[in-house]
Image (spheres, rainbow, N blue to C red):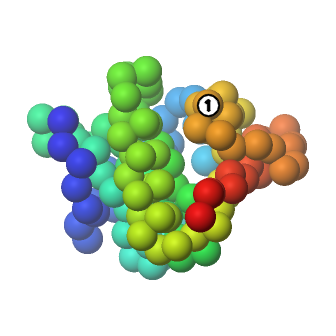
Amino acid sequence: MRLRSWQPGEESELWALTRQQPYAAYAEENDDRAQWSASLRANPPFIVEYDHQVIGYADLGRAGEIGHFYVHADWHGRGIGSLLMNKLHEKAQAQGLAGLRAHVAPDARAFFEYWGFTAVSTSEHGALMHKHLAG
């Protein structure tokens, strides 16, 4: 397993990961692939790969917004999300951010709560969650 930076040209593989279950219903709302690709270029994500296959990725914007956070369904519960979340926390600390926030799909809410995020608002599609970072 390897954690690395995203490389241009990996968009198709990441797009496919966002379309897998259980995120399909949530992802349908974010169906503009051009806008999605532009967001990757603006906030290059961290990639976790195993045997040359992308099994997860996440990014962090300058204001503390987690725009992408996906782990392949076959890899849930194996520490991939924690590896990514630790990396995002490191980056947030290096940037001196006061907090993190994310729009979280219903199936991922417990994971974000485990990491200290609390729901600011909820809808049928998930929750806007925030975490204050000690500074």
Q: Which residue is mark 1?
A: 114
How many numbered marks appear? 1
Query: Which quadrant is home to the C terminus?
Result: bottom right
* Residue 114 in picture, x, y percent from top left: 61, 31
Is residue 80 visible in the rendered structure shown here? yes
Residue 30: quadrant of the picture: bottom right
Give me the residue at 42% from left, 64% from top. Answer: 91
Residue 124: quadrant of the picture: top right
- Above or below residue 10? Residue 104 is above
* Residue 101 in picture, x, y percent from top left: 67, 57
Residue in the foreground of this view, choosing between 14 and 102: 102
Question: On the rendered structure, is 87 left or right of 23?
Answer: left
Give me the residue at 18% from left, 36% from top. Answer: 1
* Residue 115 in picture, x, y percent from top left: 59, 38
Is residue 40 visible in the rendered structure shown here? no
Give me the residue at 47% from left, 64% from top. Answer: 93
Q: Secondary structure at mark 1?
A: helix
- Above or below residue 82? Residue 46 is below
Give me the residue at 66% from left, 28% from top. Answer: 110
Q: Please identify the residue farthest to the front as the structure is shown.
A: 135
Residue in the foreground of this view, choosing between 69 and 16: 69
Question: On the rendered structure, is 100 left or right of 96?
Answer: right
* Residue 109 in picture, x, y percent from top left: 68, 34
Q: Please identify the residue farthest to the left as the structure is shown.
A: 51
Residue in the foreground of this view, choosing between 89 and 81: 89
Q: Residues within 10 Å of mark 1 (few under 14, many from 20)?
A: few
Residue 45: quadrant of the picture: bottom left
Residue type at the position of mark 1: Tyr
Question: On the rendered structure, is 85 left or right of 102?
Answer: left
